[in-house]
Image (cartoon, rainbow, N blue to C red):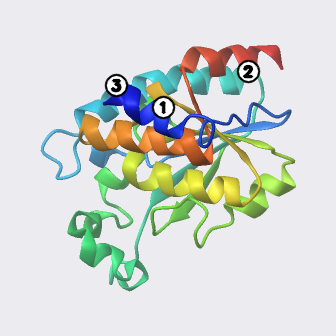
């Protein structure tokens, strides 16, 4: 089945963007809601992805690469959540003061890092992300976070549409189940960016 699928895409959806010269690391929604047992959004795979992303984050800081984070926050009345909070009721707890809405301590932002608040799946939608990356001169967006089938995919699609080379280190993204995780990595690799190993990404950063 996999061989047939790959053959079907070969020569049509198998291009590679490659790395640019000015990367930025984007950490999408690695918040406590996804790493805390008992939380409706808890996903064990996210815990592992956080550990891997910590390695990449340390290198990015050491190489003085721009680092941006996103997290979801709504007004207490949830009016800025629109239909999204109706579709995904678990998001209703993402309000200021809620511990589960905070970034995981393993990936605590430094004072020089930028935190962008969003209300929907894509880190670009309704935020200043595109303008910020452009002002920083970024051409390559290293995309980490969760979930692969939601915010990562949406951000990857918008990333290439805004003119950025999207790079996804597969060990640094996660989902609730392997099936949607792998399916969406396949689609990102086919159409929206390059899905690489964390080792390949770290090697690139070390060459800068």
Which of the marked residues, 3 or 1, is nearer the chain's N terminus? 1
Q: Which residue is mark 3?
A: 48
Q: Residues within 10 Å of mark 1 (few under 14, many from 20)?
A: few
Q: Residues within 10 Å of mark 3 (few under 14, many from 20)?
A: some
Q: Is residue 161 left or right of residue 56?
A: right
Image quadrant containing the C terminus: top right
2 or 3: tag closer to the N-terminus: 3
Does label 1 or label 2 sit earlier along the sequence? 1
Q: Residue at x 62, y 68 (%)?
A: 127
> Image point 58% across, 69% down: which residue?
125
At 73% across and 19% down in the image, what residue appears?
A: 204
Q: Is residue 205 above or below residue 68?
A: above
SS at mark 1 in the image: helix
Q: Quadrant of residue 78?
A: bottom left
> Disc 1 to disc 2, how far (Cα)?
32 Å
In terms of depth relative to the viewer, which is nearer, 81 or 75? 81
Q: Is residue 1 above or below residue 84?
A: above
**Which secondary structure, mark 2?**
helix
Left or right of 72 in this view: 195:
right
Q: Nearer the viewer, residue 1 or 186?
A: 1
User: Does residue 149 appear anywhere in the picture?
Assistant: yes
Q: Quadrant of residue 169?
A: top right
Q: How far apart are the alpha carbons under marks 3 and 1?
A: 31 Å
Location of residue 194 in the rendering, given as x and y in whole percent from the top left corner: 62, 35
**Whether label 1 touches label 2, CB < 8 Å:** no
Instruction: Check disc 2: other Cα within 10 Å, few if <14, some if 14-19, many if 20+.
Output: some
Instruction: Give the residue number, with chain letter if any, for mark 1.
Output: 7
- Quickly name the residue at label 2: 205
Residue 46 occupies quadrant: top left
Q: Is residue 159 above or below residue 91?
A: above
């Amino acid at each position: 089945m996999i061989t047939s699928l790959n053959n079907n895409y070969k020569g049509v959806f198998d291009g590679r963007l490659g790395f640019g010269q000015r990367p930025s690391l984007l950490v999408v929604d690695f918040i406590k809601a996804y790493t805390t047992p008992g939380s409706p959004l808890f996903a064990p795979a996210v815990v592992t992805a956080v550990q891997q992303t910590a390695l990449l984050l340390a290198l990015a800081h050491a190489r003085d690469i721009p680092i941006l984070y996103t997290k979801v926050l709504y007004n207490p009345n949830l009016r800025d959540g629109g239909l999204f909070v109706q579709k995904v009721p678990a998001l209703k707890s993402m309000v200021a003061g809620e511990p589960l809405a905070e970034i995981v301590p393993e990936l605590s932002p430094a004072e020089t890092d930028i935190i962008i608040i969003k209300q929907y799946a894509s880190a670009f939608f309704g935020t200043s992300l595109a303008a910020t990356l452009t002002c920083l001169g970024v051409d390559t967006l290293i995309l980490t976070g969760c979930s692969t089938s939601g915010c990562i995919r949406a951000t990857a699609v918008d990333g290439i549409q805004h003119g950025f080379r999207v790079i996804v280190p597969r060990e640094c993204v996660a989902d609730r189940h392997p099936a949607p995780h792998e399916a969406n990595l396949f689609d990102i690799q086919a159409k929206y960016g390059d899905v690489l190993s964390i080792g390949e990404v770290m090697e690139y950063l070390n060459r800068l």
